[in-house]
Image (cartoon, rainbow, N blue to C red):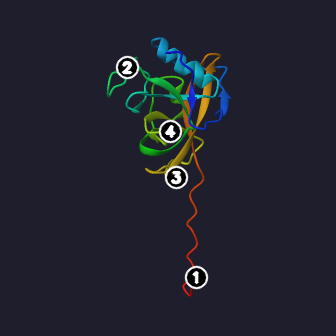
Amino acid sequence: MSQPHRSADAELLEIIDIPDWDGPLPTGDALAREYFAACAEGRLLLQECPRCGHRQHYPRALCTRCAATPQWLQARGGGEIYSFSVVRQMGTRPFSRNAPYVLALVDLDEGPRLLGTVLECELDEVEIGRRVHAVIHRIAPDLGIPQWRMDPPATPEPAGDPAT
């Protein structure tokens, strides 16, 4: 599926190098390898069907709606938390060192839903609907994993002048 990557006005995402990663490495087919390699370059890829427009994630050889061959679309990386869980106990390294942490399902602005850790957050500030943006943990030269950072809380718009 090495077609040109179409962009949704996306820029490269922040990359955080994790040179001493001792956790499991993502595996998969050629599509998965292409996805994780793009992440390592700061590009978050989704698939978009040229026939029906359906967008999907995780990478697959066929569109899940019409069975056409999807193309890559570079996402901007913004989205909102659909659901989350606070992981307080984890017996597997390296995750146990980070507990407690937040694992979230994020609805990307482009449509698909991704899973990842919310970084550098206060546990009581995470909420459904909260805006987040993707950052990449590069765990090997050709392996990047998307994670999330919360955007600053939205400030309410000031009330208009009641006299007008």
Mark nearer the viewer, 1 or 3: 1
User: In which quarter of the view is residue 141 placed?
Assistant: top right
Residue that appears at 55% across and 20% down:
36
Q: Position of residue 118 (x, y in %)?
A: 53, 39
Q: Nearer the viewer, mark 4 or mark 3?
A: 3
**Mark 2 or 4 closer to N-term?**
2
- In the picture, measured across the screen, residue 141 lies left or right of residue 115, that is right
Residue located beneath label 2 in the image = 62
- Tell me the distance, in whole angstroms, between the alpha carbons under discs 2 and 4: 38 Å
Q: Are marks 1 and 2 in contact (CB under 8 Å)?
A: no
The mark nearer the N terminus, 1 or 3, is 3
Q: Nearer the viewer, mark 1 or mark 2?
A: 2
Q: Give residue 125's mark.
A: 3
User: Looking at the image, which is closer to me, 110 or 108?
Assistant: 110
Q: Name the disc covering residue 149, or none.
A: none
Q: Position of residue 142 (x, y in %)?
A: 61, 16
Q: Earlier in the sequence, mark 4 or mark 3?
A: 4
Amino acid under label 4?
Pro
Q: Which residue was labeled with disc 4?
A: 100
The residue shown at (64%, 34%) is: 13
Q: Which mark is residue 161?
A: 1
Q: Residues within 10 Å of mark 2 (few under 14, many from 20)?
A: some
Compare residues 118 and 43 and report the one nearer the observer.
43
Judge from the rendering whether residue 67 lies leftward or rightward of residue 49; answer left or right: left
